[in-house]
Image (cartoon, rainbow, N blue to C red):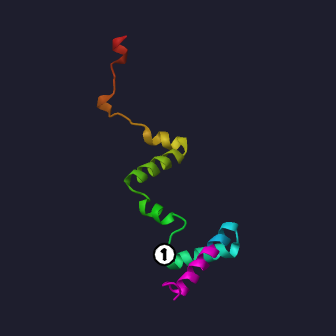
Amino acid sequence: MRNGQPVTLAKLALGFEQLANQFAKGDRHARRDVFMFSELLGIDLTGKAEALKEALTPTHQEILDAYLARQRPSDERHKDERVIAPVDLLDNDVDEKR
């Protein structure tokens, strides 16, 4: 112990600080080590974990369905959107009004 603080923790903190500096400079080995340590410690550096938790909530599902509907070929899309009225609703007296 030095000045009431364990020396090993101070060295560990300095080691991580040095690793962070090397990572910031673009050292590929430091990058590998940072991601390895983050995985071991359960730290999500990519932000994907939070995105996966929120993925495909009902509003996202509706957005996805609308997108997929737009991606279908136009012939298929128009075929699905057409509504054919039953025979008893057809306007047969069009000629009588003229």
Residue 25 percent coordinates (x, y): 70, 67
Residue 52 percent coordinates (x, y): 46, 63
In the image, is residue 67 above or below residue 92? below
Location of mark 1 (residue): 42
Q: Residue at x 35, y 33 (%)?
A: 85
Residue with the most extreme bottom position? 1
Q: Main secondary structure of the magenta part?
A: helix
Front residue of this view, candidates 89 and 30: 30
Residue 14 percent coordinates (x, y): 60, 78
Amino acid bearing label 1: Gly
In the image, is residue 75 above or below residue 98? below
Residue with the most extreme top position? 98
Query: Is 2 colored magenta in this rendering?
Result: yes
The quarter holding residue 18 reads bottom right
Front residue of this view, candidates 39 and 30: 30
- In the picture provided, is 31 more to the left or to the right than 83? right
Residue 27 percent coordinates (x, y): 70, 71
Magenta segment boundaries in residue numbering: 1-19
